[in-house]
């Protein structure tokens, strides 16, 4: 169950990054509130996952989901570079997350 919570924490991190990007484009109190809620949920669920998953593993996976997810969203919806190198290194992040899950 902790692994599902950790994935949810990573997904909330991606939502927070998306909201942060939107906040740079238009300043809105609702975006600030949504951003705060997303990051509070992300950190809270990370804390819960760390009750059963070692800190280094949990943080690495949470960070990897946030980094990879944010980059993929940027490429799909914000017209960021879709170079082969970026896609390759996102693949490495995903492979590393899977590897950490397999050995934990």
Image (spheres, helix red, strand yellow):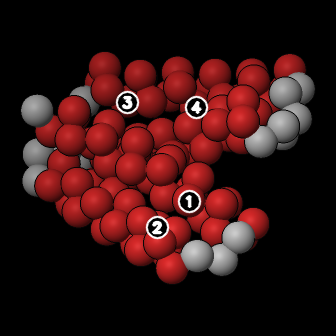
- Residue toward you, 27 or 16: 27
Residue depicted at x 64% and y 69%: 23
- The N terminus lies in quadrant: top left
Q: Marks 4 and 3, how far apart in space?
A: 11 Å
- Residue toward you, 95 or 29: 29
| N-terminal-most mark, 4 or 3 | 4
Residue 82 on image: x %, y %:
84, 27
Q: Marks 4 and 2, how far apart in space?
A: 25 Å
Q: Is residue 5 above or below residue 12?
A: above
Q: Which residue is mark 3?
A: 100
- The C terminus lies in quadrant: top left
Q: Which residue is mark 1?
A: 19
Q: Which residue is mark 4?
A: 93
Quarter occupied by residue 36? bottom left
Q: Which residue is mark 2?
A: 35
| N-terminal-most mark, 3 or 2 | 2
Tell me the mark number nearer the camera, choosing from 3 and 1.
1
Q: Marks 3 and 1, how far apart in space?
A: 28 Å
């Amino acid at each position: 169950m902790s692994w599902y919570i950790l994935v949810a924490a990573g997904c909330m991190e991606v939502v927070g990054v998306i909201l942060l990007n939107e906040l740079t484009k238009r300043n809105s109190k609702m975006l600030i509130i949504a951003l705060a809620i997303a990051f509070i949920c992300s950190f809270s669920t990370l804390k819960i996952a760390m009750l059963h998953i070692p800190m280094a593993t949990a943080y690495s996976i949470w960070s990897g989901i946030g980094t990879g997810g944010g980059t993929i969203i940027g490429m799909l919806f914000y017209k960021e570079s879709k170079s082969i190198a970026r896609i390759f290194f996102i693949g490495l992040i995903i492979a590393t997350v899977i590897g950490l899950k397999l050995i934990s």
